[in-house]
Image: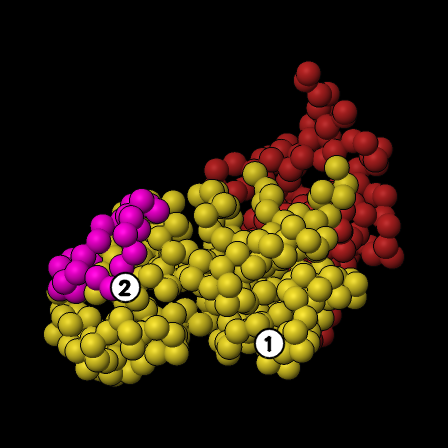
Chain colours: A yellow, B red
Amino acid sequence: MSFQHKHILGIEQMTKEDIQMILDTADSFKEINSREIKKVPTLRGKTIINAFFEASTRTRLSFEIAGKRLSADTVNISGSTSSVVKGETLEDTAKNIEAMAPDIIVIRHGHSGAPHYLSERVGCSVVNAGDGAHEHPSQALLDLMTMREHKGSIEGLEVAIVGDITHSRVARSDIYALSRMGAKVRLCGPGTMMPIGIELLGNVEVFTDIREAIEGADVVMMLRIQMERQSNILLPSLREYARFYGLNPTNLKLAKPDAIVMHPGPMNRGVEISSAVADGGQNVILDQVENGVATRMALLYLVSGVESMQTND
Amino acid sequence: MAKAETAILDKAGVARAITRITHEILEHNKGGEKLALVGIRTGGDHLAKLLQTRINEIESLEVPLGAVDITMYRDDLASRGNLPIGKTDIPFHLDGKQVILVDDVLYTGRTIRSAMDALMDFGRPSTIQLAVLIDRGHRELPIRADYVGRNVPTAREEDIAVIFDDELNPVEVRLVKP
């Protein structure tokens, strides 16, 4: 079985085998990051454009490092310094990027579906680095890689995801990925942040009390309260949110003793996660960041191969 | 449709070849204090393990052992597509080592070229020598083996199969005709 996706638009389109293959490939690439010479020639001569139309440090850096460690040439453009501010449409921007013959466009965009729209209009591979409130596939994959490292296997895990589920593309991608790999997802958040019908996306149970959601969980994943978005309308106050939905050493005790704590970052310390937990022995937050590079190397490698297999057919 | 297969080496034959190669390696490297073995996945890594055991029996030396997967260094991503990537594991410093690169079958030499590139990324060995169980010819690069179990003239359309048992010991080498 080989990987057949030319684009990585979301986890929704992936099978269990696809996810397995990405995780295994990422496992093999991880070793490169601990070498003295952190570079392999795998994608020599390929050009990767990181088009980030929305703020990002971690994901952009991670994609850029991943591309460079595979010897690809990576070029970054960001929304605030591109022609977008002059009123150019996404399609025109894309056509212009394509005219310079890149092999992969990695795109982050505030609108859900932007990567999908792009993939139908350009000839190269498109990798979604987060689109609106839709999906963030590379984040979900690095989450699974981290869970698998710590727990041995994804199947049968009880994973609590707590926070603003409505606006979280991370949650959506994780729900698809975890359900497909046979884990159980417990979603928890205030009613204003829980979309109706979310349980239809996968193997999901919805909670409003964080204590019930965490009890006996193998993994507790806290989502960032997105202060720059609508959070102030959906919440009476951050203090109240921290009290009812924040993870602290007391409620963490309800999870399994060997439970791991995850966060996609950037953290709001003292809001969704207390500093004691964020720096505590159960957190694997920096493992997630480390695995992010390996996961993105795997994605870039796998989509590159598909391109050439199709030309050969 | 069954393919025609001829046995080239049986279990005892493989064992004799490995023993001879071990002696040659030790003789050539004057005892082998600085030796290191790196096997190319998959096949070469099992043979490297066998050489390590044999060297230990003969000289009571514990030679460091590593394995390299060359998929990341292939020159044919454009034509072969995304092959699964295996693990590279070299748990020692290569600087100043006399590295014996081990593979089961030497053919075009492209795998060896890739493996040498990989080794160079890990350090600066004082020498790299090549040990193979079978040399079947048809080189496409200026590469030759320092230690050869058996030279087998083949046609390009033929194939060489090295069979390993469950304990990953080589038990037979076959020439497969199309």
CB atoms at circles 2 and 1 under 8 Å apart? Answer: no
Residue A228 horizontal side relative to residue A279, left or right: right
SS of the residue at dot 2? helix
Tell me what residue is drawn at x 73 percent, y 30 percent: B175
Name the quadrant of the N terminus of chain A: top right
Q: Position of residue A284 (x, y in %)?
A: 34, 71
Q: Position of residue B118 (x, y in %)?
A: 67, 65
Tell which circle, 2 or 1, labels the residue nearer the N-terminal end.
Answer: 1
Magenta stretch holds residue A195: yes
Q: Which residue is at a point 56% across and 59% down the rendered structure image?
A: A114
How many marks the image carries: the answer is 2
Vertical arrangement, residue A134 with respect to residue A274, above or below:
above
Q: Quadrant of residue A189?
A: bottom left
What residue is drawn where x is 69% and y is 31%?
A: B174
- Whole-percent x and y of residue B107? 78, 45
* Magenta-span inclusion, residue A119: no
Q: Disc 1 marks which amino acid? A: Gly
Q: Quadrant of the C terminus of chain A?
A: top right
The residue segment tinted magenta is A191-217
